[in-house]
Image (cartoon, rainbow, N blue to C red):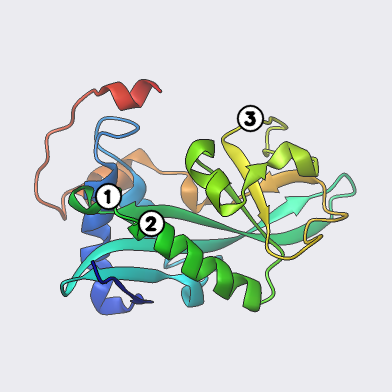
């Protein structure tokens, strides 16, 4: 399997949003919100276009990773810049073939070269530990609500990248989805029936 990884361009937007919808449909809730999040990220000031990549297999886009700027706010209300990726999407028919891993590895190196200090994400520890992610609690970083759990993880992009950076993580508000906007956006796509599935309760 030969995967080509390249920057996303505007001509890819609709195809990427559709594959994101396919990748997340019924996974965490009936239907999904991730395709709208991707759509809105590109319009926001936190978007990092230099880290927005697609994976291509046999001339078809089968994966995407997108990054935003985020911050850790310390006890003195100082903001420290970090970055966040997600959604990371792979077409269901192409999952478990290393496409997501290739996108993460490729962009991780670029982010490091660009001088970013760390990546903070929410995700599956079993999957993301292989890339060096560890519990954000190890760096004395909590969620915006002051919580910590295994699915909240951080990765230093250089040795000591998070040294002296502690506090509460603050992601861009773009990840907060408005239900009316979602319902309107969903009309731009072919109809898909929503279901309650086992994965929504994990």
Q: Which mark is residue 100?
A: 2
Tag count: 3
Q: Which mark is residue 95?
A: 1
- The answer to whether 53 appears left or right of 55 in the picture is right
Residue placed under numbered mark 3 in the picture = 149
Residue for point 84% across, 50% down:
77
Q: Percent from the top left, x then y, of residue 60?
A: 17, 69
How many angstroms separate mark 1 from mark 2 (CA)?
8 Å
Q: Are marks 1 and 2 in contact (CB under 8 Å)?
A: yes
136 shown above or below 42:
above
3 shown above or below 121:
below
In this orientation, which residue lies closer to the viewer: 156 or 23?
156
User: In this rendering, does residue 139 appear at all?
Assistant: yes
Q: Earlier in the sequence, mark 1 or mark 3?
A: 1
How many angstroms separate mark 1 from mark 3 (CA)?
26 Å
Q: Percent from the top left, x then y, of residue 96?
A: 30, 48
């Amino acid at each position: 399997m030969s995967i080509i990884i390249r920057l996303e361009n505007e001509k890819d937007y609709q195809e990427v949003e559709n594959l994101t919808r396919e990748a997340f449909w019924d996974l965490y809730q009936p239907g999904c919100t991730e395709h709208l999040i991707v759509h809105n990220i590109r319009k926001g000031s936190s978007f990092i276009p230099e880290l927005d990549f697609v994976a291509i297999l046999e001339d078809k886009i089968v994966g995407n990773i997108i990054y935003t700027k985020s911050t850790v706010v310390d006890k003195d209300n100082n903001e420290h810049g970090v970055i966040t990726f997600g959604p990371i999407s792979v077409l269901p028919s192409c999952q478990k073939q290393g496409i997501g891993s290739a996108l993460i590895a490729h962009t991780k190196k670029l982010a490091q070269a660009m001088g970013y200090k760390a990546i903070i994400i929410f995700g599956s520890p079993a999957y993301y530990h292989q890339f060096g992610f560890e519990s954000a609690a190890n760096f004395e970083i909590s969620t915006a609500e002051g919580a910590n759990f295994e699915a909240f993880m951080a990765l230093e992009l250089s040795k000591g990248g998070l040294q002296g950076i502690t506090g509460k993580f603050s992601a861009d508000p773009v990840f907060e989805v408005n239900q009316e906007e979602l319902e309107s956006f969903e009309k731009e796509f072919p109809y898909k029936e929503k279901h309650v599935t086992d994965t929504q309760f994990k």
